[in-house]
């Protein structure tokens, strides 16, 4: 019997996060203010607490995980590493496929890994309330869960299309005591402005982020901060616990390094989590193919531009050097709401520029097909975002068969899809939308980038 | 740091199921035909395959789990035993609360434990298709999952009220390749009869069972059988793997036997699973309080009668000696669809009669209150059925505090509620229905029992 579950004990949890910024061969481009000057840490202090800003700008390779946080993370960590032997058999591939199961957290995805950390650091800093955005609802649920544990107030702006597609996500956040409103909302200046211009908009993560930041900085008591579920350095840092555990578990399974590492990538955090601890091996000479998978409806890595852009639609964030489609790109309403983001994390973007990663784009019809293959072989229902990683994994496993190579493929099973079954329903009944993104539309949304500071 | 997760390896999985029938001090009353004669095994052979009928009537204490089944069960087993230390802290109880997490199976509940076993034995017997009923959808999902793994066709009759409350359950079954229709349906003679008499009925498990059996026995090729998710001896047998694992895990946690064991009980299978392996200790002198928890809307154990009754509304099953409210009792549409069954498993019923168990009934408003307390302390969203076990656990933990006793409480976390959030939504918005079941209604539904054979 092939061992399909590789478990770690609580005592085997990593004690430190890994910071890729310390190892990137060409470093990171600094964040800028809109007029092109370097952004100082203090300028972010109305948005984030200073202890997290310190992590954001840190160049230390390893950053300690405080003991009380380890205890919170141990509620669901270490997560299992599984061997996908049923999928392997179905594909008749010589590849050995492993996946890290991040769906086991109470909120159902990897997002909890940073949610509890951010809530904890905010609490340490004396903050009483966090605001945030959410796409498909995974991040909002995770932050609601985290804020409940740490006794913080929590307000979530949920992208309208997902709010409507997945009404039970709001209930889940409510069960943990958080408030959730559809974005654009009439509760902020920016939300009202967008609603006036586009009353029927499906919304976007870029809009929701603007609303959440606006509410945070508007609190005159200084006790509210904003929390972001991806993109930023410190968020990706917290997710590296995934890959660090996976490394130990692969060793237990008798494997060396993977040949291929795959993760879906919206803002980049779950992908960074599984891959960054291995990127350092690649930088030091190991041969590995590392693939962030995006939606072909929101193809910043494969069709976007590496340049300075805002993280939100209203331009309230610093300018970050990243692959982007332009901050006012409005993606079509695919079911993988977490992939509907115009930009890619600066750390992931720089690693792509440095040739360490090879992005790919998949359309949702192919991804749901992969999700059904997964359900029928491995038995579980994956999130629409995760289906992108699975579609790519299947392709890589077939490629290994064609090449006759015994490759080791590792991917991140970022979340379950039990609350996102509407897309499955549409796919199974032949009603799933197929989208093709025209070049004109892309060129138009990227035009605005020319007026922003350029990378030197 | 208190260790909150007690894990077992695949190699530690029990190799045998425990059969309580071998140990019950007064044995089990035999199933009867409608005219009061003993039911022979052959008479059941159009409904179930003979290899499962052999388990149904077995008096062997231990029954081997075949190796190929162990491999299938190892997809999600052994399941974790958790210490609920956050709930303990919140309640300020000296009790140590442990729960077995059966929500980790792909279908989300304990139901998978018997679904794969029944599908496997049917497959061995040459069967090509299984029919079944489902209440809240947990059982139908589990059988759909199991039939997909074993390449059997699967048809599920889902109680109308749950079909409407939880539409994504149908999608889940479809994703695994099963067909799901609302019951009563126009697809069977019995369904059409019920629809003609009560076009607006919410349906019941009793009706759905009749429809599923009708379809199975109507197949002239003899390649279709019916599969039941609870009540019967062999179903409860398969669930004992839960309690057998829990016993090993409690020992690892440094505990002896629990003082209190709790499970919610609709047909009795998850409750039997957690408790039966400990009931044998109680029979041999150990002191333990063992509590099956039912819904006060469907109170067969606390307000019903121990007598012979049919397992379904149409009277197609054998007569079984059990606690029942009468086979045409139509429960109100509480959200815990799995508890909407008129009878209790003969094995559990006999154990109650023998004084080995102490049933309790809870109303759904109190249970959702407990579910929210759980979500805010332990962090997870439980199924509406499971909330009944949690409500009782909280009461027992408070009792331990009042008595100043360091009791060990063990309960079965039978399933997650991520697909059943509508009840949470109603509870949180103050719209959850509160039901009181009148004595007249009960007396009326139990009248029909007088005309059936009586227990001698």
Image (spheres, coloured by chain):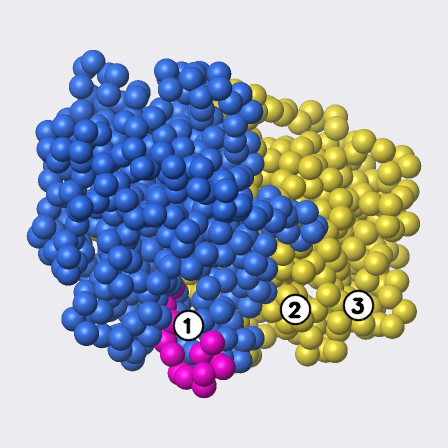
Chain colours: A yellow, B blue
Q: What's drawn in magenta, residue-wise?
A: B399-412
Q: Contact, CB < 8 Å: mark 2 with mark 3?
A: no
Chain of the residue under the numbered disc 2 shown in the image: A
Mark 1, residue position: B97
**Residue B320: quarter of image:** top left
Q: Residue at x 27, y 34 (%)?
A: B452
Instruction: Return the residue nearer the eye: A282 or A151.
Output: A151
Residue A407 at x, y = what percent? 31, 46
Residue B150 at x, y = what percent? 25, 33
> Is residue A174 within the magenta segment?
no
Is A222 on the left or on the right of A151, as rendered? right
Q: Which mark is residue A119?
A: 2
**Residue A124: quarter of image:** bottom right
Is B396 on the left or on the right of A317, as rendered? left
Is B160 on the left or on the right of B116, as rendered? right
Q: Residue at x 36, y 76 (%)?
A: B408
Q: Which mark is residue A224?
A: 3
Q: Residues within 10 Å of mark 2 (few under 14, many from 20)?
A: many
Instruction: Return the residue nearer the eye: A262 or B139.
Output: B139
Task: Give me the C-alpha separation between circle 3 and circle 1.
Answer: 36 Å
Residue B134 at x, y = what percent? 40, 35
Q: Is residue A72 above or below residue B303?
A: below
Task: Give me the C-alpha separation between circle 1 and circle 2.
Answer: 27 Å
> Is residue B411 within the magenta segment?
yes
Which residue is most to the bottom? Answer: B404
């Amino acid at each position: 019997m092939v061992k399909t579950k590789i478990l770690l004990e609580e005592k085997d949890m990593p004690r430190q996060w890994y910071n890729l910024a310390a190892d990137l061969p060409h470093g990171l481009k600094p964040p800028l203010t809109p007029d092109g000057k370097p952004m100082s840490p203090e300028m972010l202090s109305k948005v984030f607490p200073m202890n997290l800003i310190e992590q954001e700008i840190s160049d230390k390779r390893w950053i300690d995980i405080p003991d009380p946080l380890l205890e919170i993370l141990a509620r669901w960590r270490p997560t299992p590493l599984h061997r996908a032997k049923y999928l392997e058999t179905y594909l008749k591939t010589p590849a050995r496929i492993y996946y890290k199961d991040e769906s086991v957290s109470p909120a159902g995805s990897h997002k909890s890994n940073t949610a509890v950390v951010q809530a904890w650091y905010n609490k340490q800093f004396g903050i009483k309330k966090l605001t945030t955005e959410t796409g498909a609802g995974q991040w909002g649920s995770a932050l609601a869960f985290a804020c409940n544990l740490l006794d913080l107030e929590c307000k979530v702006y949920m992208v309208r299309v997902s709010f409507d597609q997945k009404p039970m996500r709001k209930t889940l956040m409510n069960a943990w005591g958080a408030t959730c409103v559809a974005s654009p909302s009439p509760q902020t200046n920016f939300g009202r402005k967008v609603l006036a211009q586009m009353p029927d908009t499906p919304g976007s993560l870029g809009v929701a982020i603007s609303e959440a930041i606006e509410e945070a900085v508007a609190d005159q008591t200084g006790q509210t901060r904003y929390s972001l579920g991806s993109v930023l350095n410190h968020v990706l840092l917290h997710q590296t616990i995934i890959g660090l555990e996976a490394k130990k578990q692969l060793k237990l399974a008798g494997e060396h390094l993977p040949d291929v590492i795959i993760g879906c990538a919206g803002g980049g955090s779950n992908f960074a989590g599984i891959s960054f601890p291995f990127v350092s091996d690649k930088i030091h000479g190991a041969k590995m193919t590392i693939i962030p998978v995006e939606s072909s409806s929101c193809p910043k890595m494969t069709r976007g531009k590496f340049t300075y852009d805002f993280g939100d639609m209203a331009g309230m964030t610093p300018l970050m050097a990243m692959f982007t489609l332009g901050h006012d790109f409005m993606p079509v309403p695919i079911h993988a709401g977490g992939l509907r983001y115009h930009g890619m994390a600066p750390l992931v973007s720089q690693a792509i520029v440095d040739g360490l990663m090879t992005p790919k784009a998949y359309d949702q019809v192919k991804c749901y097909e992969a999700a059904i293959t997964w359900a029928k072989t491995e038995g579980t229902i994956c999130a629409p975002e995760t289906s992108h990683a699975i579609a790519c994994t299947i392709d890589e496993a077939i490629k290994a068969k064609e090449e006759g190579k015994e490759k080791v493929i590792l991917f991140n099973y970022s979340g379950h899809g039990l609350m996102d079954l509407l897309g499955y329903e549409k796919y199974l009944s032949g009603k799933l939308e197929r989208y093709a993104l025209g070049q004109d539309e892309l060129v138009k949304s990227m035009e605005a980038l020319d007026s922003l500071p350029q990378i030197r």
